[in-house]
Amino acid sequence: MTDQAQETTTTAKIGRLARWRQSDLWWSFTRSPSAIAGALILLVLIAAAFAAPLIAPQNPFDPAQLDLWNSELPPIWQADGQWPYILGTDTQGRDMLSAILYGSRISILIGVCSVILSLTVGLSLGLVAGYFGGIVDNILMRIGDVLLSIPTILIAILVSAVARQMLPPELRDVGSGAVLVLAITLSAWVQYARTVRAQTIVERGKEYVQAARLLKTPARRIMLNHILPNTLTPIMVAATLNFGMAILTEATLSFLGIGMPPSQPSLGTLIRLGNQFLFSGVWWIVLFPVLQLCLLVVSVNLLGDWLRDALNPKLR
Amino acid sequence: MIVFLIKRLANAVLVMLAVALMAFMIFRFAGDPVELMANEQMSQADRLELREKLGLNDPFLTQYVRFVVNAAQGDFGISYRNGQDVMTLIAERFPATMELALVATVLSLLIGIPLGVLTAIHRGRWYSEGLQFVSIIGVSLPSFVVGILLILVFAVSLGLVPAFGRGDVVQIGWWSTGLLTASGRASLLLPSFALALYQITLVMRLVRAEMMEVLRSDFVKFARARGVPRWRINFRHALRNCLMPVVTMTAMNVGSLIAFALITETVFQWPGMGMLFIQAVTFLDIPVMAGYLCIVSFIFVTLNTLVDIAYAVIDPRLRDATR
């Protein structure tokens, strides 16, 4: 019995893979150099970031491994560069490459978490508002209107600053990741909610939903199993582009000094720390985290741009 | 039309009330105002008296109404940090930010429109494809990164322009301007370009998309058939028909430019409202935070409402559509 079940799932898996290989999406992916480049760069960056403990020459969080004698070493291709500090060291003797790898890990994690959380919040509120309409819809969309009428970066800054203040002091450093995720989510969910709501209102009137209703399918089931899959196409595009936005917002907040603390530096924190030495000739402390951040966001956006065009029925 | 006008204005007022509620909640719940204002020597009785004087014992609604009434008159209380009136502090910094945002807007139009036209009429050439690609990068770069890179190249390596501050300013009434002195103009270059870059790419992409559509239309074909010179078709006939959405987007985005200026201001140590706000955030100077939030949102909401109303005046179909 279980064997049989397993067999069906594996055939389903193979079938799915084969189907994916034949899909329009895969075809358009193989034809778009910028999408392939974006995907490859992103894969390499994510793999390197999560393998950081294995491949980084140094653990930048371990003070025992930092040596002030090795501070402010330039990158290896310059005259005073030293192995293994390929990208040089900062003012505390921290290896820049290691710091960047560990920093990217934090940035990517916060980006992924906030996309997942804002997707969950946005999808459920959008579905409920669109499906039931009426007063729930009205209230949710009014809140959305207000949030959209203030620049998103302001919301993120305010939430982050206020939430941090409400935490007890000993939790402030530990909780800053969670605070950032919350801040980014609060400024990002409206977009998902609006997209899903609009789509849900369209789908609600279609025959298959009426049929499901006649069969007395519970509302929750109709929303999740029948309507949600039909709203996912625009959501996928928005989620990809928002992943880039989330990383940028995190970096901006950390750069402004209200994000990740120096004890757990994300890319934005590294840039802020390096920015203080902009005029003292140690350009590598700020330049390499900046380049890494750009590479990360550009690759995500290349992928998102392609996805938007590939899934746009008008352009097919 | 009057119904539309009233609806749109009521909507704007509602949004402002909600923003004021947010500002008020920060005021009330992010830390106890009395604890933040009181110093070590204050006795318990003094604290209670201060609490009563600030009206913190009144019901929530009364406090909120008082906050809104005061805010509408430009009274956001006094700064926790240096005891100055919040409105005076913000008004001092206001011209610097406005100058930055306006110069950035002008830059984005001056650079973005020609680039958009160029990439539209020379589609497929290597330089327009290159510009398209650069514009994706421009959208992806956060503005603080643009600022840092500009400082590294133009101020640190080349030493061409100052990297921070406003230079010398001239006081005209309550407005202070850096546009009238050489050092003021030089200091304005990097920050305004850093702020404008994102907007430039937006304008460029919009003009390009619109131009490509207009160039396919019949009146352009007819103009070509009549033998009208190329440049005249492109700039007199086609471009004019693309400018409406560009103007709308620019007007609506002045608000976001003012908000995003806070990042540029931090990078370039520009003494504007944004830097005041960031300092207030790090010191948890709540009256300044609340004041900044309300004023920037007010500018934002006013611009959006004006654009909407202007559109409804021009195009009557929209009066029903936005209902």
Image (cartoon, rainbow, N blue to C red):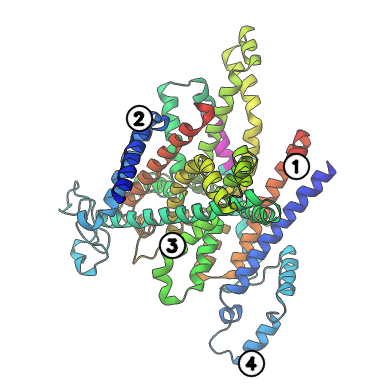
Whether the magenta-drawn stretch holds residue B110 is answered as yes
- Disc 4 from disc 2: Cα separation: 74 Å
Say which residue label 4 marks.
B45
Q: Earlier in the sequence, mark 3 or mark 2?
A: 2
Q: Residue at x 57, y 53 (%)?
A: A220
Q: Chain of mark 4?
A: B
Q: Are marks 1 and 3 in contact (CB under 8 Å)?
A: no
Say which residue label 3 marks.
A259
Say which residue label 1 marks.
B309
- Is disc 1 placed on a helix, strand or loop? helix
Amino acid on which disc 2 is placed: Thr
Say which residue label 2 marks.
A30
Amino acid on which disc 4 is placed: Ala
Question: Do callouts 4 and 2 point to residues on the same chain?
Answer: no
Around disc 4, counting alpha carbons within 10 Å, would you say few (fewer than 14), some (14 to 19), or many (20 or more)? few
Nearer the camera: disc 3 or disc 2: 2
Question: Do callouts 4 and 3 point to residues on the same chain?
Answer: no
* Quadrant housing the C terminus of chain B: top right
Amino acid on which disc 3 is placed: Gly
* Quadrant housing the N terminus of chain B: top right
* Residue B216 drawn at (x, y percent): 59, 18
